[in-house]
Image: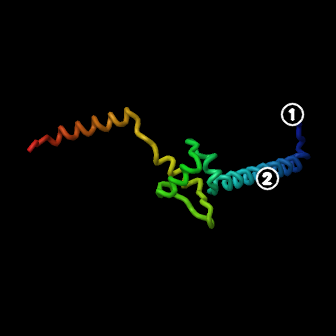
Amino acid sequence: MEKIISFDQLPTAVNQLNDKLENIEKLLLEKQEQSISEQSDQWFSLNNLISYDPAKRTKATWYSIVSRGEVPYHKNGKNLIFLKSEIDKWLKTGRRKSNAEIEAEAESYLLNSKRKGYHGK
């Protein structure tokens, strides 16, 4: 639906347009602030961590991982708490190389070894 604006109505139309743009800008800024606050670090209790864990390890398994010092954790009194960012980083360190990556690494090593020469003394 196209509205025709006369020359006399132009200042009012521009003001209305400006108001609408300000409202859109305000909504976008609120949305941006909301997304930033959602991205801030989140604390997990042990039960939250078990739910978040892709491997779905048990509580006993997590206690043993913590006691071995393999995972970053914090203590809040007697309770174990975990930062989501630290858990994400820890989970990413467990990445294993694919067979193709291992083969390429071995091939590269063999090629470099041949160049340096073998002095089997």
The colour scheme applied to this rendered structure is rainbow
Whether pointer 2 and pointer 1 mark residues with C-beta atoms closer than 8 Å, the reply is: no
Image point 26% across, 39% down: which residue?
A: 109
Horizontal side of residue 114 vs 50, given as left or right: left
- The x, y position of residue 121, in whole percent, is 8, 44
Q: Please give the count of numbered marks on the rendered protein.
A: 2
Q: Nearer the viewer, mark 2 or mark 1?
A: 2
Image point 37% across, 32% down: which residue?
A: 100
Camera-side residue: 30 or 71? 71
Q: Earlier in the sequence, mark 2 or mark 1?
A: 1
Camera-side residue: 68 or 85? 68
- The x, y position of residue 55, in whole percent, is 55, 42
Horizontal side of residue 89 vs 36, given as left or right: left
Q: Which residue is mark 1?
A: 2
Label 1, secondary structure: give it. loop
Q: Label 2 to label 1, Cα distance in Å?
A: 22 Å
| Residue found at the very far front of the displayed protein | 60
Image point 55% across, 59% down: which residue?
A: 73
Horizontal side of residue 72 vs 13, given as left or right: left
Q: Quadrant of residue 83?
A: bottom right
- The x, y position of residue 51, in whole percent, is 63, 46
Quarter of the image with the N terminus in it: top right
| Residue found at the very far left of the displayed protein | 121
Q: Quadrant of residue 33?
A: bottom right
Query: Looking at numbered disc 1 in the image, what kind of residue is underneath it?
Result: Glu
Image point 89% across, 37% down: which residue?
A: 4
Query: Looking at numbered disc 2 in the image, what kind of residue is underneath it?
Result: Glu
Label 2, secondary structure: give it. helix
| Residue found at the very far bottom of the displayed protein | 77
Camera-side residue: 21 or 31? 31
Q: Which residue is mark 2?
A: 22
